[in-house]
Image: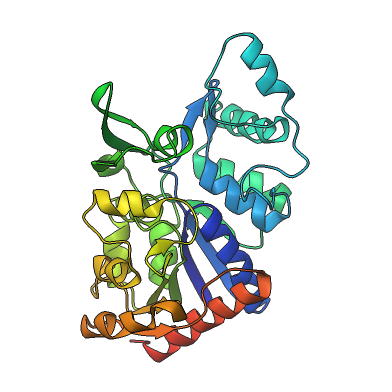
Amino acid sequence: MRIVALAGGIGGARFLRGLLAAVGPQDEITVIGNTGDDIHLYGLKVCPDLDTVMYTLGGGINEEQGWGRTDETWSIKAEMKEYGVGPEWFGLGDRDFATHLVRSQMLTAGYSLSQVTEALCVRWKPGVRLLPMSDDRVETHVRITDEQGTRAIHFQEYWVKLHAAVDAEAIIPVGADTAKPAPGVLEAIAEADVILFPPSNPVVSIGSILAVPGIREAVAAAPAPVVGLSPIIGGAPVRGMADKVLAAVGVEATADAVALNYGSALIDGWLVDTADEASVAAVEAAGIACRAVPLLMTDVEATAEMARAALALAEQVRK
């Protein structure tokens, strides 16, 4: 079975770990990773979502944080601070720096982001084929209004520095309109037996991937069933502040509202948590098959059960 998953950072990475535990060695998983969170810091290209997937599946993630490296040290960051070079609000540990140095050196040498990602995965062996959504530069920005007036800032500044404390007025995927899907992305979607939307942020993770011209259309046209898992449980994000960016695109932070925002033209099935069983009827009324199952990723086995439920629903709605 060929499975394609569109994935963001922590939620997507942890779901993928459960998916790997749920399938057999004969199954092939291709992950199309969000690069809208990418940022240039200290002269380096940082790809937070790609790295979180790579580290999580490769056994190098800081489990408590869900991002960054395990057994990390912070000497470089401390030295940069002594030089007065920021930003101080974004944490790059020493081990993490090495990844960004290698990536930036390869990009400067003329390799594409896809080629660099493949090379980095040789070390980490994540057990999946990890593709960036695009080799072109795409950065998600957020329009806000604060004491400095109305302005657009990088998503990382909004999320990490401001902790989404200011209302997001608009989400702007800068560069997405002229970007092209990375090599292999459209082919993987067209050849997939199942396409999954993990419980990643529907606006700035999966939404950013779908904003690249050709990807949304490929998913909608794919013969494979498309099944998503709700990142909202009981009217609140499981992790992070997805409600803030959902509000910016006019979508309520509910399991059924997120499904309806994707729409029946894009997804065939949708899983909600048992706490949101009352929302099943509204989703099914919109032409999307819906089931209520436990969706808390408390451990790998619980997450594997979520993945099995998603694959089972995909079989039920297969076109």
Name the one closer to the observer, 228 or 265.
228
What is the tally of numbered marks visible in this picture? 0
Q: Residue at x 52, y 40 (%)?
A: 47
Horizontal side of residue 198 vs 211, given as left or right: right
Please say whether residue 67 is visible from this viewpoint. yes
Estimate the x, y position of residue 259 in percent, counting from the top left: 30, 71
Horizontal side of residue 315 vs 60, given as left or right: left
Decide: is 298 above or below 269: above
Estimate the x, y position of residue 5 in percent, counting from the top left: 47, 65
Q: Residue furthest top?
A: 83
Please say whether residue 193 is visible from this viewpoint. no
Q: Residue at x 44, y 70 (%)?
A: 196
Name the one closer to the observer, 58 or 243.
243
Q: Residue furthest bottom?
A: 316
| Quadrant in which the C terminus appears | bottom left
Estimate the x, y position of residue 8 in percent, counting from the top left: 47, 54
Estimate the x, y position of residue 126 in percent, counting from the top left: 66, 57
Q: Residue furthest right?
A: 71
Name the one closer to the observer, 44 or 235.
235
Q: Residue at x 59, y 45 (%)?
A: 51
Res. 150 image quadrant? top left
| Quadrant in which the N terminus appears | bottom right
Q: Residue at x 27, y 68 (%)?
A: 257
Res. 169 image quadrant? top left
